[in-house]
Image (spheres, helix red, strand yellow):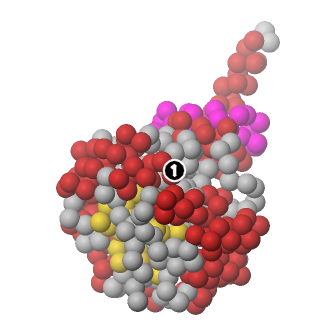
Amino acid sequence: MPIKRDVVITEVCLRDGSHAHSHQYTVEQVAKVAKALDEANVPYIEVSHGDGLAGSSLQYGLSRTNEMELIEAAVSVCKQAKIAVLLLPGIGTKKELKEAAQLGARMARIATHVTEADISAQHISLAKELGLETVGFLMMAHMASVNTLVEQAKLMQSYGADTVYVVDSAGAMLPHDVRERIKALRQTLSVNVGFHAHNNLSLAIANTLVAIEEGATRVDGSVRCLGAGAGNAQTEVLVAVLDRLGIQTGIDIYKMMDLAEEIVAPILQAPQEITRDSLVLGYAGVYSSFLLHAQRAAKKFNIDPRDILIELGKRKVVGGQEDMIVDVAAEIANKRKNVQTSSSF
């Protein structure tokens, strides 16, 4: 008998969480987490490199394990959950999407910058041809006006997306930002509307609730907040809160609590909390996956990672421009060196 769900949750700890785990997931870890999520009745589990299919690279971070092996492992242990994959056009290609589908993936989430929906047309179309449930994923949504967001969402709908997501990649949105964007999409689109939060300003749960209030029926969560930056809306918390509100997710709360505590927590390289650096991501409106890259660059050049992130925010750098992180760090270090040299005369 089908499980009744008022809101459908996609678990992203095995994709977004890859950023926090430095893309070092093993087959054993993914299989164990996916099996537990499946047993807790989580309907969708996203599995891929943090930057989507084919993301493993020097620029984005090298994976320990080929993501196709991780996808295959997750599919093999799931009895009811469907495996989703993320693809960013320009990083992933049709080849990887076809391979993921052949391995058993059942949902494709095609992600673009919020003003670049037009580059998703061929990938959304292919996903539909492959029989996949297809999601348009508009990243860094805080950087566009509501009108622009609506126009971009309409493009994704026209290409065949079953759902279009407002994606707060930087964790920079305040509740009123979420409310007006979800409301506008709900009034304009004929497909499902979704929301993906990050917790850099400690608003992931609050913003997700606002999105649901305004009609979003698809939302994302990450167990134990395992995601880029300070993580996403914490799934076990979100499920408990929605249950208190009488909103059905079909997910077993006790099982979510147990797997968060016993399976996912031991995987964490460090506790997922709002540190000064992840807070700056939300404050400056910077892509959450930039965090570890900025921290490494700061250590290399002996500067404060917050200075790098603030400068990246001023330059309105977006996902895919990770190479700018080292450039900005070098510029800051050189300026300080020049100031110190001139002051010594």
For residue 275, above or below residue 70: above
Residue 316 seen in the figure: yes
The 10 Å Cα crowd at callout 1, few under 14, some 14 to 19, many 20 or more, is many
Q: Is residue 113 visible?
A: no
Foreground pick, 197 / 208: 208
In the image shown, does 147 or 302 lie closer to the viewer? 147
Q: Which quadrant: the C terminus?
A: top right
Q: Which residue appears at 35% of the width and 78% of the height?
A: 133
Q: Residue at x 43, y 69 (%)?
A: 248
Quarter of the image where one finds residue 146: top left
- Identify residue type, mark 1: Ala
Residue occupying the point 65% across, 67% down: 257
Please say whether residue 314 is one of the residues in the magenta stretch: yes
- Location of residue 17 (image quadrant): bottom right
Q: Is residue 157 left or right of residue 200?
A: left
Measured as percent of width and height from the top left, residue 229 is found at 61, 50
Vertical relation: 316 (above or below) 69: above
Segment tinted magenta in the rendering? 297-316
Which x, y percent locates residue 290? 59, 49
x, y percent for residue 342: 73, 14
Q: Which residue is mark 1?
A: 204
Main secondary structure found in the magenta portion: helix
The front one of 186 and 304 is 186
